[in-house]
């Protein structure tokens, strides 16, 4: 029997699909009311974001704790006001009046607790007298974005007539390069266009998007509420939205495609809804569960904010899964046989098979070794650059060149050197008055270290139990030499200078924190990979009941991830096509990006694997041999997998419209990986490997078959 013919399958999903079809008004009403309640609660009681990645057991975290304990006035965020007065110089009386006025403006700003004028002490005016800076301390961390934007506009308005003011700092990066924005709308519109081309029907496209948006909306509302017990960084909603938009549309696409196939074969709508929910819905649940498991694998990194983002993304995926198997069957019940209503000419095809994909599969099956070698070679070549990946965080130097933050970076770099934007904050615990005498030699040792450009005078805490000073490297935050200098200070210079003195010294600050976080990522990424692969293998074994196919899926995903990382290195670090894609400069890859690309891609790749292999397995169970089952399964899934991948790629590439560099990297990496996975992997490597393995594809030891639960 043709496996695509709608029978009346049993099981919970079939009963669920039948219930949602017959009680479609009740289901739709419940979803509408539930979504409205969640949205009202979520946006009304939205938790503030938490972008403090310090924490943990790193040395920068210990330094931050000491600062909070002994220097409470430094707990909030800080801003730097960069000033350039050329050729008059900051000593000119007219320039000084304008600088003093700007300092007064900062002092009067909300939540600013202290401002240090460039005229307050030595070291704040460059040697040629044309560049200076003021520092502003806030009692907030982070500062209110609207207030920062207002200060940015005030500095721009005060500039002119030979004097330039510009604000810099981490909060300026957040204010000038926000997450999301127009990219979300661009991604949604692009996805709608792809679905419209695939289905050729406004109604089919509308139902698919509606189900996905219900899932995303409810997921985001829950994220905002979960932010109270589980604080999350500001990029969490963006990650969740991108992932939810991609998988939500894909899951709805899988079910609607199966529904249209059944109708095209002449079967009754209720029977087709039940079969689509039971069969495509089964794939959706397993694929979604894999995405959730992959995201929750981030917990092994042991970083609380990343854990929160993993939970947020998982909640959104979970809601899209629920809408796909409950709301969508109800919506299909309303559509009935009119699913292709409002059909556009020349677009969309209802046929369940793609002759071109079937012919292509047979070409690969005739030359499987050639296909395997060619496909694997391309993936490996793209992966090689990933071996030189460096990790860091964006700063003012990586902002778009038209921003005030980048201007501040340029001014201060010209006046004080590139390392001014990469300070090391050295904190020393002073156990006794006698130990304080060792601070002077410590400062001199740090100042005399090659690569250190300048050191500020030490500052003693009010309780006398700690001293703090700032050291400026001669290299920039993004320069590879800067973390090397940090390692040298921590590993040799500081221990040698304080040996036997009783001082306990830690090096912190934003640059040290970024370096520590990047090191933690590099150390824990292998554990993340092993955890996610192990859990996903178990899930795949339950679904496809094949050792070879489960292992093949893991290897193929690793190739896709490696290739995506390699492309990121070529573009972000090496600068290939970086200006064309909206990257203003070369820089290391943002530290959190690889952590999220891997589990997300593993889950998405498994989506395609599950959908493809499930159809191949249906053909195989219907009596076809492996070669025929692969060709027929690929022909029945190629069109929907291509459409799903096109949706993913357009959604992820849409974030290139956002000004934030890290988000650009995240979207680009995922887009490249999904494109390669849907083309080289699904269309070349999978049929080639399955042809070479033959009956081994379906091998499962009897003991393992007894142990594994039935899907």
Image (cartoon, helix red, strand yellow):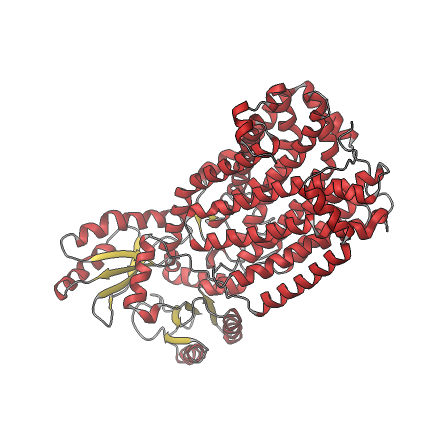
Specify whether 257 is left or right of 313.
right
Residue 51 lies, in percent from the top left, at 46, 60
Q: Residue 210, located in which quarter of the rendered image?
A: bottom right
The residue lying at 37 percent from left, 52 percent from top is 475
With respect to residue 685, does 292 lie above or below?
below
Q: Is residue 499 visible?
A: yes
For the N terminus, which image quadrant?
Answer: top right
Specify whether 21 is left or right of 517.
right
Residue 256 lies, in percent from the top left, at 75, 44
Q: Is residue 577 visible?
A: no
The residue lying at 52 percent from left, 36 percent from top is 562
Nearest the camera: 172 or 269? 269
For the C terminus, which image quadrant?
Answer: top right
The residue lying at 47 percent from left, 52 percent from top is 307
Specify whether 676 is left or right of 591.
right
Nearest the camera: 504 or 157? 504
With respect to residue 525, does 366 lie above or below?
above
Residue 246 lies, in percent from the top left, at 64, 48
Q: Residue 473, located in which quarter of the rendered image?
A: bottom left
The residue lying at 60 percent from left, 44 percent from top is 288
Specify whether 166 is left or right of 481.
right
């Amino acid at each position: 029997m043709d496996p695509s013919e709608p029978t009346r399958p049993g099981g919970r999903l079939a009963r669920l699909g039948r219930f949602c079809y017959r009680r479609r008004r009740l289901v739709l009403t419940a979803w509408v009311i539930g979504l409205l309640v969640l949205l009202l609660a979520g946006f009304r009681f939205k938790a503030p974001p938490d972008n403090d990645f310090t924490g943990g057991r790193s040395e920068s975290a210990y330094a931050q704790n000491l600062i909070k304990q002994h220097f409470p006035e430094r707990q909030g965020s800080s801003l730097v006001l960069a000033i350039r007065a050329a050729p008059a110089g900051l000593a000119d009386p007219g320039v000084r009046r304008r600088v003093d006025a700007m300092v007064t403006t900062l002092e009067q700003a909300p939540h600013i607790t202290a401002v240090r004028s460039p005229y307050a002490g030595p070291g704040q005016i460059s040697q040629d007298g044309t560049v200076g800076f003021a520092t502003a301390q806030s009692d907030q961390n982070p500062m209110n974005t609207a207030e920062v934007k207002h200060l940015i506009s005030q500095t721009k308005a005060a500039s002119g007539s030979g004097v330039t003011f510009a604000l810099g700092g981490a909060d300026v990066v957040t204010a000038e390069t926000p997450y999301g924005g127009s990219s979300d709308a661009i991604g949604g519109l692009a996805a709608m266009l792809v679905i419209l081309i695939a289905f050729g029907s406004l109604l089919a496209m509308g139902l698919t998007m509606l189900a996905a948006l219900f899932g995303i909306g409810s997921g985001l509302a829950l994220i905002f509420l979960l932010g109270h017990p589980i604080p999350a960084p500001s990029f969490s909603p963006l990650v969740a939205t991108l992932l939810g938009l991609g998988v939500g549309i894909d899951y709805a696409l899988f079910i609607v495609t199966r529904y249209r196939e059944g109708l095209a074969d002449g079967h009754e709508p209720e029977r087709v809804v039940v079969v689509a929910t039971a069969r495509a819905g089964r794939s959706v649940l397993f694929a979604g569960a894999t995405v959730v498991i992959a995201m929750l694998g981030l917990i092994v990194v042991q970083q609380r904010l990343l854990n929160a983002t993993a939970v947020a993304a998982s909640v959104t995926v979970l809601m899209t899964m629920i809408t796909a198997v409950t709301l969508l069957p109800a919506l299909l019940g309303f559509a009935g046989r009119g699913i292709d209503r409002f059909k556009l000419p020349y677009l969309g095809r209802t046929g369940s098979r793609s002759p071109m994909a079937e012919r292509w599969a047979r070409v690969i099956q005739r030359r499987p070794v050639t296909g395997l070698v060619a496909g694997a070679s391309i993936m490996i070549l793209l992966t090689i650059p990933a071996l030189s990946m460096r990790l860091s965080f964006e700063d003012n130097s990586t902002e778009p060149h038209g921003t005030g933050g980048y201007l501040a970076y340029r001014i201060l770099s010209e006046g004080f050197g590139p390392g001014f934007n990469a300070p090391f904050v050295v904190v020393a615990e002073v156990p006794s008055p006698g130990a304080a005498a060792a601070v002077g030699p410590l400062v001199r040792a740090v100042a005399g270290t090659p690569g250190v450009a300048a050191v500020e005078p030490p500052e003693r805490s009010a309780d006398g139990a700690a001293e703090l000073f700032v050291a400026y490297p001669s290299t920039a935050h993004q320069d590879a030499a800067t973390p090397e200098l940090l390692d040298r200070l921590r590993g040799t210079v500081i221990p040698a200078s304080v040996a036997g003195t009783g001082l306990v010294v830690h090096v912190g600050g934003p640059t040290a924190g970024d370096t520590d976080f990047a090191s933690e990522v590099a150390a824990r990424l292998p554990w993340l990979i092993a955890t996610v692969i192990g859990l996903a293998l178990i899930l795949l074994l339950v679904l496809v009941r094949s050792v070879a196919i489960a292992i093949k899926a893991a290897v193929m995903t690793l190739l896709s991830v490696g290739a995506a990382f390699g492309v990121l290195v070529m573009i972000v670090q090496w600068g290939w096509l970086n200006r064309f894609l909206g990257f203003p400069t070369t820089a290391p890859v943002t530290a959190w990006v690889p952590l999220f690309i891997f589990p997300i891609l593993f889950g998405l790749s498994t989506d395609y694997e599950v959908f493809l292999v499930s159809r191949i397995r249906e053909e195989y169970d219907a009596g076809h041999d492996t070669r025929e089952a692969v060709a027929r399964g690929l022909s029945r899934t190629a069109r929907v997998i291509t459409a799903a991948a096109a949706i993913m790629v357009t959604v992820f590439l849409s974030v290139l419209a956002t000004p934030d560099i890290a988000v650009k990297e995240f979207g680009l990496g995922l887009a490249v990986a999904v494109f390669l996975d849907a083309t080289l992997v699904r269309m070349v490597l999978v049929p080639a490997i399955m042809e070479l393995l033959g009956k081994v594809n379906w091998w499962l030891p009897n003991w393992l078959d007894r142990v594994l639960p039935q899907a």
